[in-house]
Amino acid sequence: MTDLSMAQAVVHAAKYIGAGLAMGIGAIGPAIGEGHIGQGAMESMARQPEMVGTLTTRMLLSQAVAESTGLYALLIAFMILLI
Amino acid sequence: MKTSVKFSKNEKIFLGVFFAVYAGVALWNFDKVKFPSGVGHIWQIKVPLPSILGTLNPMTIIMTAVLLVVLIYMAIDFKKHLKKIPSRKQSAIEILLSFVYDLVKDVIPAEEFVKPVFYIATTIFLFVLSSNLLGGIPGIGIGVSSKGGLKLNLFTDTWHSPTGDLNTNVTYAVMVLFISHIFAIKRKGFKQWLKEFASPNPIMLPMNIIGEIAKPISHSLRLFGNIAGGGIMVLMLSYLVKYTFVPVILWGFFGFFVGTIQAFVFSMLAIAYIGVQLEL
């Protein structure tokens, strides 16, 4: 890490900034989506407390699907950092 | 109603030995832990084949073979001990399988395709679930050190899980794609199947084709991202606490919780993709 030329240093800095931005911006969408799913599940649980079991599994399932775009961002961030 | 948790003697001995070994290894590792430099790199060997077939991931192949043997052995053993009055294990498996069967019956519109889809979905579910769970158990693996050589990971990493490798996931996702189209041709006939691509009007033809190609990509990358990303995050976080106690919790979360949900999601999506193609 000691003998870096200016160009290499810029590339290193850009890598870290890019990975951070990719993960940070990429997490916004899934966060909003999962929040909506959780809100819907909570509302319907309050309306029908006897359905809690079914609703929880369905909620987790759809949250896992909604999470996938965030995971693409994570993969891209790791690719930028490590490769 | 039980008011307190009681352990039998064997369980106490097992837990004692487990924690003793774990504490010993943790103390032994404590001042030797370096930042995991081989993160993101896996053991690969080159074989003389054209470009894309030219590299093999030996750990994936070994672990897949071991898993298949274990699963087949367990299935044969289970079938041998089937009884009319079910034991506890048999009834647990029956509940699980009938749960999946009801799901398949709801999604698949054609009566004669329910059983084949059920077999495919449960096979995928069992394999993906057991290989995800392996990603939550500390074990022995072969990794790559910073200089490029191989190194033995002795309980500083989880078992190598086959679904943490994109090749496995793409294989299953493409398999599901082909199965869904073959079933669609069988149900609707070749002409009707071709006509579906140009529906509702021919302008949508490229959209439909892109949609079909995007299915296996998102299907496989979802599972890969969860398992591989979880593994890398566990490695980095466990370095921060020098592998003392947090890895157990993290391995539990990423391996068991996320692994179970993702295995379920993977097989549910396989059922849903096949079900969409089977609609007339």
Image (cartoon, coloured by chain):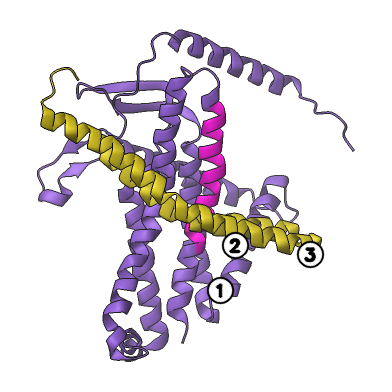
Chain colours: A yellow, B purple
Quadrant location of the N terminus of chain B in the rendered image: top right
Does the magenta run of residues contain B36? Answer: no
Both on one chain, marks 3 and 1? no
The relative height of residue A20 versus residue B28 in the rendered view (above or below) is: below
| The magenta segment | B248-268
SS state under label 3? loop
The alpha-carbon separation of the residues under discs 3 and 1 comes to 24 Å
Residue B21 picture location, percent across and down = 54, 14
Number of the label disc, if any, that sits on residue B107: 1
Q: Is residue B13 visible?
A: yes
* Quadrant of the rendered image containing residue B176: bottom left
Q: What is the crowding at mark 2: few (fewer than 14 residues within 10 Å), some, or many (at least 20)? A: many
Q: What is the crowding at mark 3: few (fewer than 14 residues within 10 Å), some, or many (at least 20)? A: few
Which residue bears the numbered disc 2?
B100
For residue B147, side relative to residue B273 (left or right): left
Which residue bears the numbered disc 3?
A48
Q: Is the magenta stretch mostly helix, strand or loop?
A: helix
* Along the line of sight, the residue nearer the viewer: B261 or A13: A13
Proximity of marks 1 and 2: CB atoms separated by less than 8 Å: no
Residue B76 picture location, percent across and down = 53, 49
